[in-house]
Image: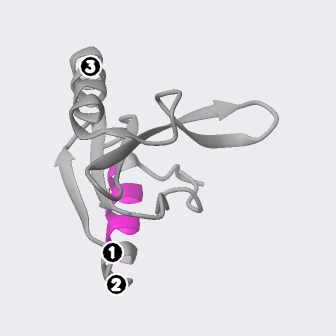
Amino acid sequence: MARLTTAMLVAAVMAEANREMVSVVLSHRGDAARGAIFVRLEGKNGQARVEGRHHDPAKGYVWAALHAEDWIDSPAAEAILEKQISYDQDCWVINVDSPEGVNPFVHHEG
């Protein structure tokens, strides 16, 4: 069975979010085959949450914040993403308007 590429996963999740009237914007396009994905959740009052996906041997793929606090200010979120992009130009960054902190990628495998 063929593996789902990052580009296909991103396109599918963005299309589903748009159908559900969730604002989703691709802000950095990475490697189509296997780039890492980072999601910036735009919350209330200029707060943000940056999540990345990692593999846990016991749980499979897990999404977690890249910072200790639940929500951080927007400039801090931007700094985290700029640092990730500087390490890995092949990563993807998706911005999601999500005051409740719901990451649309959580329920999708890839």
105 horizontally vs 90: left or right: right
The residue located at (24%, 37%) in the rendering is 30
| Vertical position of residue 78 compared to residue 63: above or below | above
Q: Which residue is mark 1?
A: 22
**Residue 89 x/y as whole percent:** 22, 25
Residues in magenta, as a range: 7-15
Q: Which residue is mark 3?
A: 83
**Residue 1 x/y as whole percent:** 60, 54
Could you tell me what secondary structure mostly forms the magenta stretch? helix
Residue 20: image quadrant is: bottom left
The residue located at (39%, 76%) in the rendering is 16
Which amino acid, mark 1?
Answer: Val
SS at circle 1:
loop
Around disc 1, counting alpha carbons within 10 Å, would you say few (fewer than 14), some (14 to 19), or many (20 or more)? some
Res. 19 mark: 2
Q: Nearer the viewer, residue 86 or 90?
A: 86
Seen as rendered, the residue at the extreme right is 58
Res. 35 mark: none
Q: Closer to the N terminus: mark 1 or mark 3? A: 1
Residue 77: image quadrant is: top left
Q: CA distance from mark 1 to mark 3?
A: 26 Å
